Every structure is written in structure tokens, then in C-alpha cells.
Amino acid sequence: MNVWSFLPRACLALLPCVLLILELCASASAQESTANQADALFVAGKVKLAEKDYEQACQLFSESFRIEAATGTLLALAICQERAGKLASAFASYNEVVQRSNKEQRPDRAKAASEKAAALQPRLSGLRVVLGSAAGAAGLVVRIDGEPVDAAKLKSTIPMDGGYHAVEVSAPALRTWTETVTLAESGDEKILTAPALRQLKNEPRESRAATQPSAATTPQATEASESSVAAAPPGAPVLPSAAPIPAPERAPERADSTPSSEADSSDGGSSLSALRVTALVAFTAGLVGLAGATVFTLRAVHDNDASRTGCNGNLCTAAARNQRLDARQAGNLATVGFVLGGSLVGAGALMWLLGGHDPSASSAESGHSVRVALTPWFGAHALGAVAQGAF
């Protein structure tokens, strides 16, 4: 068996496995990083909640839930909103916790959230918008604090947090009606009645200008143009219409001289082949990856050792917990670096060996040529490549 014809096929067969390993490592690292970020925000929110800094705590819980939608985080956000006096927001969050807990088969959490929501309901403040004579307008839209309100919700009182709220009722070609209202934190219900929306008195200046005929299209201008054509003398020359300029003809391409085989052989012997140049690039990149992986390994070991002073088993202080999270992330990056660097070093060594062989001789004997194409692709949390080849 000719080893030089076998090695490209073996490399091409192993390439999808290498790319799959790299993609799995990158995806796992991205997921781990996202989970660590959400966990860190949740821990910081609990600290702010204990300090009674409810505004900052609610922002941290909300951002943590946005990154990773965990039901426990949503429950903490509901508790924070209740303590901050945002009863309507807390009521909605508790009800969402009930729905998610039922799907996750957590009846204990669903029961606790349901009891909290039931206790809040009598204390809620609310706003009801009555459309009255404005209800018949086509395309009517009601907005509260800039957000459109579904028509079904307008039939009853809408729970709202205490504070200042802006109500807007609008429709096409009608004047917008706006009103503001201030609700107390608890037990305040108010009703706003929207009047009939009035027609806009004046059209925009642009629309009036568009409807006015121009001087060139008036009947007087048309008659003048016709009379000028009729008044032309019989022997007057007629100006021809502008003809399109033909595109210039394309000049014939000049045949380039073909280099001789003697020049090819002399150039090939005096410089590295393209495959060996690629091998040097891959080998260098692999060494850089291995060096970076070594640095991240040392950092992971250092952070893990430093966190032991603040931990008792799995119970850690905030600083020690952050050090352990940093150590875990550094370890993941080191794993990816070792896998990627080792793959590049191996691929570079293999391409260096293949680059010293003259594939033209073997391909001329077999009547086939060896072609390998590698196309990389990148995603939001993954990377990979598509390999194509012919032998």
C-alpha cells in the first residue's frame, strides 16, 4: 500500500472527529461561562437584598433571569419586588413561578408562590381605562407608559405598580388624547374615561403640495406646447432623440506565456512547498495554543488553592466562591487550549511530512489528483469547519 496515498484519506476521515471535539469543548465552555455569570449575579442580588438595597437587588435578579431563566431566580425577583413596594410586578412574577413550577413538577414551590400571590391580590393598585365614545374609532390603540394594551385587558382593572403612569389613546387621522395619573402603592384604583377623538383640522403642508398640479401639467401649458409644434415651418429640421451610447467592445485578452517545466522544477526545489508553509503556520499556532493552555492551567491551580482558605466543604465565602468560579473557567479554557493546540501541532507535523513528497508523480501514475479544501465557520457559541476532498 502506498502510504502517501493513504495518509490524506486518513487525515480527512479523522478531521470531522477533531472538529466535533473542538465544537463540544467550545459549546461547553460557553454554557459554563453563561451559567457562572448568572450565578454570580444571583449571589450579588442576594447580598443587596440582605442589605435592603431593593432597587439594585431587583436589577441583579432580573439580569440573572435574563441570562439563565431559572425558576428560583424568578422567585427571588418576586420577593424583591414585593419588598420594594412593586406589588403588581411581584403579583405577576409569583403567578409565573406557579406556572413554571407546575411544569417542573415542583408542587412545594408552586404552593408557596400561589399563597404569596393570593395574599397580594387584595392589596393591588389598579387602573381602568374606559373608552366610551372613542371606542368606535378605526385602528384605535391604547398605551400605558408607552406599552400597547390588549383590548381584552381594557374590560377590567389592570393591576399597576404605585407611582406615575401616562395613558395615551390614538387612532389614524385623529388627534391623540393623553392623560396622566398617580397611583398609591397599595389599594388605589382609578378610572379614566377617554373622550371621542377629534379630527385633525389641517393636512400637512407636504400633502397639500403633492395634490397641487405643477405648471408643466396644466391645461394652459399643454395647449401652448401643442400650438408651438403646430406653428413650426414645414422645412424645419427635427432634432433627433438621444440615442444610447453603445458599450465599448471588450479588447481580446492577451495570452500569457506558459512557464516551462524546467522553471517549475527549479522554483520548487529552491523554496518550501505551500503545504509545508501551511504546516509551519499550523505548528506555530498550536505551540501558542499550548502555551496559553499552560498559563490558564497554572491560573486555575492558583485560584483553586487560594479559595480553600475561605471554604468549608461546599460552603464558601463570597470571595472564595468567586475564586472557585474563576478557577473553573480557567480550567475550561485550558482544556480547550490543549485540545486545539495539540490538534494544530499534530496537523502541522503531518502536513510537514506530506509536504516533502511530490504528489505529481504519484498522481500521474494513478491518473488522479489530490485536492483538500477546509472552510471554517463560526457561530454565536460554537466553531467548526467543513472539509471537502478528492483523491
Image (cartoon, rainbow, N blue to C red):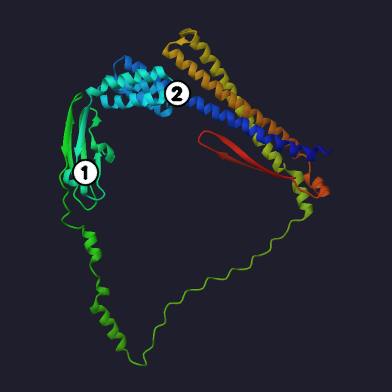
Q: Amino acid at mark 2?
A: Glu
Pointer 1 local density, CA inside 10 Å: few below 14, some 14–19, many at least 20: many
- Could you tell whether 110 is left or right of 12 in the image? left
Is residue 283 shown to the viewer in this render?
Answer: no
Is residue 343 left or right of 325 when viewed as pictured?
A: right
Mark 1: amino acid: Val
Could you say where residue 120 lies in the image, as x and y percent from the top left?
A: 26, 21
Q: In this figure, which residue is indicated by the disc labeled 2?
A: 104
Q: CA distance from mark 2 to mark 1?
A: 40 Å
Q: Quadrant of residue 359?
A: top right
Which type of secondary structure does the marked residue at label 1 adopt?
A: strand
- Quarter of the figure that contains the N terminus: top right
Above/below status of 375 relative to 342 = below
> In the image, which disc is placed on residue 265?
none
Residue 230 percent across, percent down from the top left? 30, 88
Viewer-nearest of labels 2 and 1? 2
Q: Quadrant of residue 373?
A: top right
The quarter of the rendered structure image containing the C terminus is: top right
- Residue ID at (24%, 60%): 206
Residue 95 seen: yes
Residue that numbered label 1 is attached to = 169
In this rendering, would 336 be left or right of 122?
Answer: right
Classify 28 as above or below 48.
Answer: below
- Whichever of labels 2 and 1 marks the residue nearer the N terminus, that label is 2
Q: Nearer the viewer, residue 211 or 191?
A: 191
